[in-house]
Image (spheres, coloured by chain):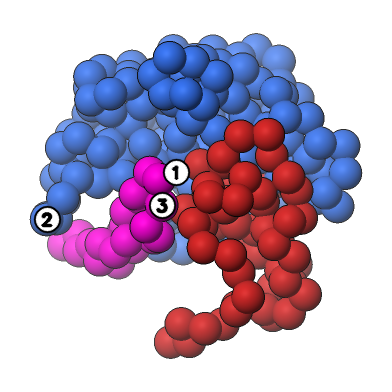
Amino acid sequence: MRRFTVSWLAAAAVPVLAISSVGLAALPSQAAWGAAPAGATSGHVYWSTAGACPSGGGFVGRASLGGTGVVQNFIAPGTCVAGIAVTSKYLYWTQANGGTAAGIGRANLNGTGANPGFITVAHNSCGVAVSGSFIYWAGDVGTTIGRANLNGTGVNQNFLTVTSTGPTAGVRPSAGRT
Amino acid sequence: MNPDFITGVTAGNIDIAVDSTHIYWADNSGSTIGRANINGTGVSNKFITTTTAPFGVAVSG
């Protein structure tokens, strides 16, 4: 049985729901939305900005763990860049699209090979998490969590249906460094 | 539960990331990435200044 505790992360310009995935014991402790797996070697902080959604300007920034070497436009995948997650090899991000079908992007940790359309998702994607062999995402339209293999195959838009009073927006594994 | 584990943080934080030594947060209202030691000390609200409001934050390494 999977149970979720849903709570607001913060009231901000873009409200975000954090879903504490209590009961998601199947998820091994690795990376999460905003976290990295043990053994990751890139040593950087990454951040996403939505830009002037949906007209443009969203990007992914990067800096060293010491706060130096700031690159504001490390990756410029397009508009409405929202959630972000890293593994030892790749950087993943969601691109919201005003409620219609959107995408999950992927790039190498050094910024090369950026593919904004790595996975096409059915709903406005927001939060993203990676764990083990899978990538998970939540949208701010609807109450479902999707899942796919880390290589982008096996897309299941409705892997979980979440009981919530509002849309899902963030997702992260219960274990791991979140 | 300690809801005040880290204080002095500016409002508008919408995402958080953790590595073995630090906690990082994205401050959407202040256009900054904040950081504190994993034990809650050493709060730096303007660890990184971003040119536009950050939404998410992640850390590797």
* Colour chain A appears in: blue
Of the numbered discs 2 and 1, the one sitting upstream in the chain is 1
Q: Is residue B12 magenta?
A: no
Q: Which mark is residue A12?
A: 3
The magenta stretch spans which residues? A1-27
Q: Residue at x 60, y 79 (%)?
A: B7
Q: What element does badge 3 sit on?
A: loop
What separation in Å lies between label 3 and label 1 (alpha carbons)? 21 Å
Q: Which mark is residue A129?
A: 1
Q: Which chain is red?
A: B
Q: Residue at x 55, y 33 (%)?
A: A49
Task: Please indicate whether residue A81 sits to the left or right of residue A42 in the image.
Answer: left
The vertical placement of B13 against A110, above or below, is below
Task: Please indicate whether residue A15 sits to the left or right of residue A31 in the image.
Answer: left
Residue highlighted by disc 2: A165
Determine crowd level at label 2: few under 14, some 14-19, many 20+ residues with C-alpha closer than 10 A. Answer: few
Determine crowd level at label 3: few under 14, some 14-19, many 20+ residues with C-alpha closer than 10 A. Answer: some
Of the numbered discs 3 and 2, the one sitting upstream in the chain is 3
Q: Amino acid at mark 2?
A: Thr
Quadrant in which the N terminus of chain B is drawn: bottom left
Judged by depth in the image, the label closer to the viewer, 3 or 1, is: 3
Of the numbered discs 3 and 1, the one sitting upstream in the chain is 3
Q: Is residue A14 magenta?
A: yes
Judged by depth in the image, the label closer to the viewer, 3 or 2, is: 3
Judged by depth in the image, the label closer to the viewer, 2 or 1, is: 2
Q: Position of residue A30 (x, y in %)?
A: 54, 52
The vertical placement of A69 against A161, above or below, is above
Q: Amino acid at mark 1?
A: Ala
Frontmost residue, B26 versus A64 = B26
Frontmost residue, B23 versus A42 = B23
Residue B4, visible in the rendered structure: yes
